[in-house]
Image: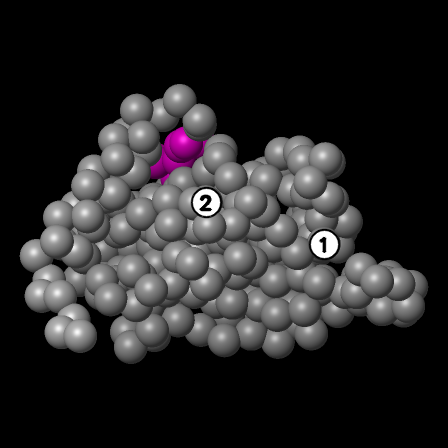
Amino acid sequence: MTYGVGLKLNRGIVFAADTRTNAGVDNISKYRKLHFWREPGNRVIVLLSAGNLAVTQSVISILNEQIAAAEPDSTLVNVGSMYRAARLVGEAVREVRRQDGPSLEASKAGFAASFILGGQIGSEPPRLFQIYAEGNFIEATDDTPFLQIGEHKYGKPILDRVARPEMRLGEAAKLILLSYDSTIRSNLSVGLPIDLLVYERDSLDVKRVKRIEQEDEYFRNLSAQWSDALREAFKKIDEFKV
C-alpha cells in the first residue's frame, strides 16, 4: 500500500506519494508512485498511484504505449483538457480490469487501484481528479481542495483542519509533509522516501520535484518540531474535571 495526496491551490497544486510497497512484513521494497508528463509551455500532467502494484504499473504502461503510438487526441500529451486526460486514465484502468480483473477477483488480492491525476493544459486552470478502480472519477473543488489515495486516514485530520485554497505553495508542502509524518508514525505500510512535486500555476513546466529521503534534515526537524508543538498545545488545554 502507499499514501498519495494532491492539494489544489489558487497558486497551483502540490503532489506527494511515498514509495513503500509491501507484501508482508518481511517483503518491503520501494517503487516510484509519482509520475509526470510535461511539454514546457503546453502542459504538465501528474499521476499518483496506490493499490496493487501490478495493476497500477499496467495502467502506466498503457498510457505510455499510447504516447509512443502518437495517436491524435487520445494520449496524455495531446488531449485538449484535464477532463479528457482523466477519461484516458479511467479507460486504461478499465482495460486492465478487463484483462486481469477476473483472476484477481478470484484470489485474495482483488482488483485494487486508485489514482490522483492533476496538472494544467494550456490556458485551462489547473485541475485535480481522483480516479477509482472502476475507472470513474471525482474532481477537487474549493470546498474540498485535497484528494487522497491509499492509507490516508491518519493524514486526513490535519488536512481537514488546515488546508485552504489561498495557501502558499510552501505552506501546502509543509502541511502535506506533516500529514505524512502522522501517517508514518501510525502505519507501517507507509514510509520514506516521499516524492514531492510542487506545480506553480501557469508555469506549464515541472521545476520543483524532490525525493524526501530518510536522512532529510527538513523532514526530521519538521517531525520533531510538530511533536513538541503538539505536546505544548496539549499542556495548555484545561483538564477534564472528574
> Is the residue 238 above or below the residue 13 in the image?
below
Near mark 1 (Cα within 10 A), the count class, few <14, some 14-19 or many ≥20, is some
Give the x, y percent position of residue 69. 74, 48
What residue range appears in magenta? 206-212
Whether residue 12 is visible here, answered yes or no, is yes
Give the x, y percent position of residue 77. 56, 51
Which amino acid type is marked by label 1? Answer: Asn
Q: Secondary structure at mark 2?
A: helix
The foreground one among 236 and 94 is 236
Is residue 209 one of those drawn in magenta?
yes
Which residue occupies the extreme front position in the image?
242
Q: Looking at the image, is mark 2 or mark 1 earlier in the sequence?
A: 1
Give the x, y percent position of residue 194. 46, 38
Report the side of 78 relative to 210 (left or right).
right
Q: Secondary structure at mark 1?
A: loop
> Is the residue 95 above or below the residue 78 in the image?
below
Residue at position x 91%, y 68% in the image: 106
Residue at position x 30%, y 24% in the image: 217
Is residue 236 one of those drawn in magenta?
no
Task: Tell me the colour scheme of the image.
Answer: one colour
Near mark 2 (Cα within 10 A), the count class, few <14, some 14-19 or many ≥20, is some
Q: Which residue is mark 1?
A: 52
Q: Of the residues tagged 2 and 1, which is closer to the observer?
A: 2
* Rendered image: mark on residue 184: 2
Distance from the alpha carbon under mark 2 to that under mark 1: 20 Å
Whether residue 123 is visible here, answered yes or no, is no
